[in-house]
Image (spheres, rainbow, N blue to C red):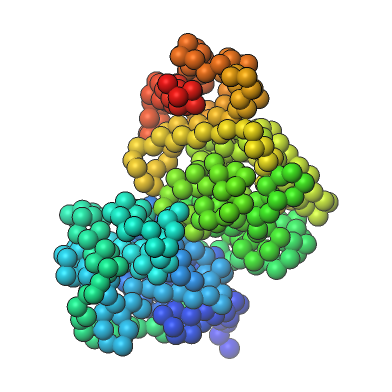
């Protein structure tokens, strides 16, 4: 008898994932770390979603996951089990084009087959939700709101004007309906035809924290939350990713609540959830402001606060904010839990204070209504920007002077930092023009940025000083 091939053996051993695509149940037998994009295109024959950047920047692979627009290149199939996926092939129903598709045709918004599918899915998510960003239902349908909704999609052809016009037309209606071409009206979606890739990592999805701790202690697994960093690194060829520890199903890592004088945010809380949370708006609105500047809707619906901390990038947008807020990061393992100040959590470049058998569980932000926090991010573009400088400043006003000052920055050193010399110049001082100038000069001298592909060290110093000067000016009202 001939021995089974490696691929046949892998197919037999691969778990089966069941979910719904365009209202049709499907199942695939693939490793859990396989990208949803690859499952759609290779295993299910739905090629409307395109491979663009593979990093979550272009939006060409956008689909709806339980109604939220996401980049399918950053979603592992292990996190799609039992969920609803909608692709561009699923927009047309009953033999008729979706009103948004018809509007794209009417306005000339259809430009090429690479960008248009993602634009359609982002626009459809916007129209279905009735909100975009922090706009309440029924708010004015402005060009700015539409542009924010599609800001995660890059157009390489003629621009965005007619696309914005199409979304507005579909929202305001009516749109002349159109018959869907046969290929769109009856999209292919097959089950059991998996095209295996031996490089796809496996994944374990624990349902309880104790199980996650045991798997982590066993070694050989990379924790995976939203995937917006982990899957990018895998596609970039970062070695050593053979199996993921999927944290998405752990209820213990979710939720936002108030307890013991602090705002408690679960590590798996997404940026979109931070933006929507009434508790965040009441007790730490700066977190919502920060979250609104992380990528676009596709990234905000997937990226998590805990994941941003664990990645420990010096350009991480949330990290200076957590430093300025005096946040505590609660971590845990089989041995128990411990709380680490954010200021002690990043000992070196891309390193954290986590032990190898620990996970980030939650973030605790002290509730201090007497404190003011300001946040500024400067990047090379308005949307989907990696920061050149990110700065957060917190203080308490007392008799016209600033007290308990915190000045925290990212992208200006190997780790996110507190600028302690600059804090000292502001502590106990009134926010005058002279104080602002001294603080800015002190900050420029204190930080040690380097030249890289995004910016020069000199530019970063200048920008950091100017941002701080502006924050002091704005606070003083002069």
Q: Is residue 324 above or below residue 264?
A: above
Which picture quadrant has residue 82? bottom right
Residue at the far front in the pictured view: 399
Residue in front for this viewpoint, 305 or 448: 305
Q: x, y (%) of residue 246? A: 62, 62
Residue at the far right in the pictured view: 335
Residue located at (40% from left, 70% from top): 128
Residue in front for this viewpoint, 219 or 184: 184
Q: Is residue 464 left or right of residue 352?
A: left
Residue located at (53% from left, 71% from top): 80
Q: Quadrant of the C terminus?
A: top left
Question: Would you say residue 112 is visible in this rendering?
Answer: no
Q: Quadrant of the N terminus?
A: bottom right
Q: Is residue 396 above or below residue 17?
A: above
Which picture quadrant has residue 117? bottom left
Q: Is residue 154 left or right of residue 241?
A: left
Residue located at (73% from left, 66% from top): 208
Q: x, y (%) of residue 338? A: 78, 44
Which picture quadrant has residue 455? top left
Q: How many marks?
A: 0
Q: x, y (%) of residue 303? A: 52, 54
Q: x, y (%) of residue 320? A: 56, 35
Question: Would you say residue 432 is visible in this rendering?
Answer: yes
Residue located at (45% from left, 31% from top): 389
Q: Is residue 283 above or below residue 210?
A: above
């Amino acid at each position: 008898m001939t021995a089974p091939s490696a691929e046949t053996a892998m197919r037999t051993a691969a778990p089966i994932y069941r979910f719904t695509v365009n209202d049709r149940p499907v199942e695939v037998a693939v490793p859990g770390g396989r990208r949803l994009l690859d499952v759609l295109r290779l295993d299910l024959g739905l090629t409307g979603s395109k491979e663009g950047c593979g990093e979550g920047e272009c939006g060409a692979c956008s689909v709806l996951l339980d109604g939220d627009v996401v980049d399918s290149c950053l979603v592992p199939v292990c996190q799609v089990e039992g969920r609803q996926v909608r692709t561009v092939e699923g927009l047309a129903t009953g033999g008729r084009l979706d009103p948004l598709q018809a509007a794209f045709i009417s306005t000339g918004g259809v430009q090429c087959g690479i960008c248009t599918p993602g634009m359609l899915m982002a626009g459809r998510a916007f129209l279905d939700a009735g909100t975009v960003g922090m706009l309440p239902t029924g708010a004015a349908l402005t060009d700015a709101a539409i542009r924010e909704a599609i800001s995660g999609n890059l157009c390489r052809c003629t621009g965005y004007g007619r696309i914005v016009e199409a979304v507005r037309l579909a929202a305001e209606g009516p749109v002349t309906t159109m018959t869907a071409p046969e290929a769109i009206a009856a999209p292919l979606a097959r089950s059991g035809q998996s095209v295996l890739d031996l490089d796809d990592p496996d994944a374990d999805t624990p349902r309880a924290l104790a199980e996650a701790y045991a798997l982590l202690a066993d070694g050989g697994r990379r924790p995976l939350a939203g995937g917006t960093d982990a899957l990018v690194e895998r596609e970039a060829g970062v070695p050593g990713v053979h199996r993921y520890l999927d944290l998405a199903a752990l209820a213990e890592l979710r939720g936002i609540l108030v307890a013991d004088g602090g705002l408690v945010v679960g590590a798996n809380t997404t940026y979109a959830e931070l933006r929507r949370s009434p508790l965040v708006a009441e007790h730490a609105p700066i977190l919502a402001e920060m979250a609104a500047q992380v990528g676009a809707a596709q990234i905000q619906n997937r990226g998590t606060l805990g994941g941003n901390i664990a990645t420990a990038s010096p350009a991480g947008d949330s990290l200076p904010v957590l430093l300025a807020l005096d946040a505590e990061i609660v971590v845990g393992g089989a041995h128990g839990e411990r709380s680490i100040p954010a200021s002690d959590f990043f000992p070196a470049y891309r390193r954290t204070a986590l032990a190898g058998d620990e996970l980030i569980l939650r973030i605790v932000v002290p509730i201090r209504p007497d404190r003011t926090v300001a946040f500024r991010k400067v990047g090379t573009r308005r949307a989907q920007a990696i920061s050149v400088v990110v700065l957060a400043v917190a203080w308490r006003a007392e008799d016209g002077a600033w007290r308990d000052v915190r000045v925290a920055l990212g992208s200006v050193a190997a780790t996110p930092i507190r600028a302690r010399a600059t804090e000292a110049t502001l502590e106990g001082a009134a926010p005058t023009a002279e104080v602002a100038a001294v603080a800015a000069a002190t900050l420029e001298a204190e930080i040690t940025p380097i030249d890289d592909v995004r910016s020069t060290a000199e530019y970063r110093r200048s920008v950091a000083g100017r941002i701080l000067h502006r924050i002091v000016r704005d606070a003083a009202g002069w």
